[in-house]
Structure formats: C-alpha cells, structure tokens
Amino acid sequence: MGNGVDLRMLANNGGSVVISDYGAHLLRWAPAGQADVVWTPSTWHIEAGKSLGGGVPICFPWFGPGFAHGKQLALNPSHGFARLRRWALDEGSFDDSHIRYVLDSQQLNDNEVPWFDDEPGAQFHAVYDVQTGNVLTMSLTVTNTGTAPMSYEAALHSYLHVGDVSGAQLVGLQGATYLDATEEGFPPKTQDAQVVTFGEQPVNRVYYSDARLELRDDMLGRAIHISRTGSPQTVVWNPGADGDNMSYTKPGEWRGFVAVEAAVCRDRIVTLGPGESHVISQTLSVGSL
C-alpha cells in the first residue's frame, strides 16, 4: 500500500484515500463510485521545506501567523511547522481503512521548540488518525509531554471539491458569530443569511460554531456533510479571484474548492497542563441534494 517514497493508499469497498508521509498530508478521498471529495490542485508536488497545496494540511502548532495570550504574532512558517515535517508512520496501524501518524517534539530542531517565548518547557506528542470508507474521519490528538503548561492552535485545513464555487452553498452557520479576516482588525459579525455563498470576492472567516454543516453543490448534484468534535470554531475560506495569484494553483482552479476546517485558534487556543490531551476531528460524508 506504500510506494516507497512518500505516498500511501488506503482502499476498500467504501472508498479510497491517498496520504503523504510528508506533513501527514491527505491528498485525496473519494467514496466508491463518487467524484473526489478532497480537492488537490493539478500542480501539486512534494518538495522539502514547502507545503503541499490543497488536500488536508495539518495546521499546528499555530494557525496563520499565530495568536497567543491576546496577541497577534508573526511566526514562520504560516500555519506552523507540522505540515513541513515528515511524520512517523505507525506501521502496525496501517491497513485498507486506517492509518496513524506521529509527530513528537523530540523530532524537532532546537529553534522549533518552544514556539512561544513564555512557555519554554513546551513538549508534545501528536497523533493523527485517518479512518476511511464511505465516510472519512480525521483526528488530531495532542498530548503535553512536558512539565509545564503548553499552548497551541490547530486546524484540519480541508479543501473540499465543488463543481464551481458560484454554485456552492454552505448551510448550518446561520446565527453564528464570526471574525472576518478580509477586513482589518477581524471585526466580529453575525451570519444573518441562511447560507454562505462564494464567488469573485474572497471569503475568509473564523466562525464560532461546531454545528453540523452541509456543503451543497448544484453542479455536482451532491451535498458534503461535515461534522466536527473538539473544535469550537469552523474556518471557511475561498480566495475568490485572488486565487489566480496563488503559487500552487493554475488560474481558475480556485473555483474548484471551498475550505471548511475544524479549528482551535485565536481566543480559542488550547492550553494543556502536563499529561493532558486534546482531540479535534472532522468527519465527511456525501449525500444527494
């Protein structure tokens, strides 16, 4: 099931997954007989020190440039170092429906731990589980293995495939408060409309909601059902026409995805005491409209 390089394939009667050891980055999931649900650009490739485009990158231990203790930071690389590291495969876990990866602070360079100056004892053990079939579940468990409190942000940055963003609607967030990253200062707003829609203008929001969602896709004639646990926030993103300037896609490819992400970030950053763990997970399934 491995190819001796970076990619692993899980395939069974319910569906199939392709995932890379580099970043524990899931590149493809499709239920049997269905179009791909997880979107990856046509130009994707593996290059050490650079993130893979699309798929489901693991954002950890910070989200974006980082946020902690009430302050916006300027940490590099954006979205943390986890997606730029080779995760260790748990060989005993690997079969046609399940795979597990591990990233431990003992694998990191001295300049990567700690990531916050005021938490010099940060040590962790991260486990990423993927279960596949006609349903896909991705779970990230982080345990504080140090002797002092440790804080982190995380997200399962899921790019979901749609026929065209102009015909996609995200349902389930009406009434939720959100932060709008397209406006300076992230002004808090309320989702008044029943659906979130997409088009030429960018959408980049952190919703305070863990509600079950449905991404309706008129062009492909299906609905992607999205549920999360351990995640008080949902990040929703599409770059709009600005996507033509993204380095990892061809012009127009931004129309083929909507990112919907289980997240713990900004003022919902996780702080773990020694020995404590936290799990965030995201589950995807497909139904008809």
Image: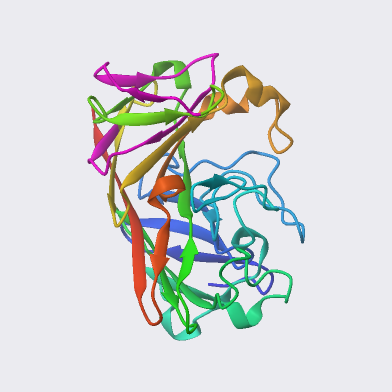
Q: Position of residue 278 (x, y in %)?
A: 35, 67
Q: Residue at x 58, y 45 (%)?
A: 64
Q: Position of residue 203 (x, y in %)?
A: 49, 24
Is 200 within the magenta?
Answer: yes
- Viewer-closest of 53 and 217: 53
Is 117 within the magenta?
Answer: no
Q: Residue at x 62, y 71 (%)?
A: 114
| The C terminus lies in quadrant | top left
Q: Which residues are magenta?
A: 186-214
Relative side of 196 to 71, left or right: left
- Viewer-closest of 134 and 208: 208
Scheme of image coloration? rainbow
Quadrant of the image occupied by residue 85: bottom right
Relative side of 59 to 178, left or right: right
Say if 179 sits above or below 1 in the image.
Answer: above
Q: Position of residue 189 (x, y in %)?
A: 36, 23
Relative side of 45 to 229, left or right: right
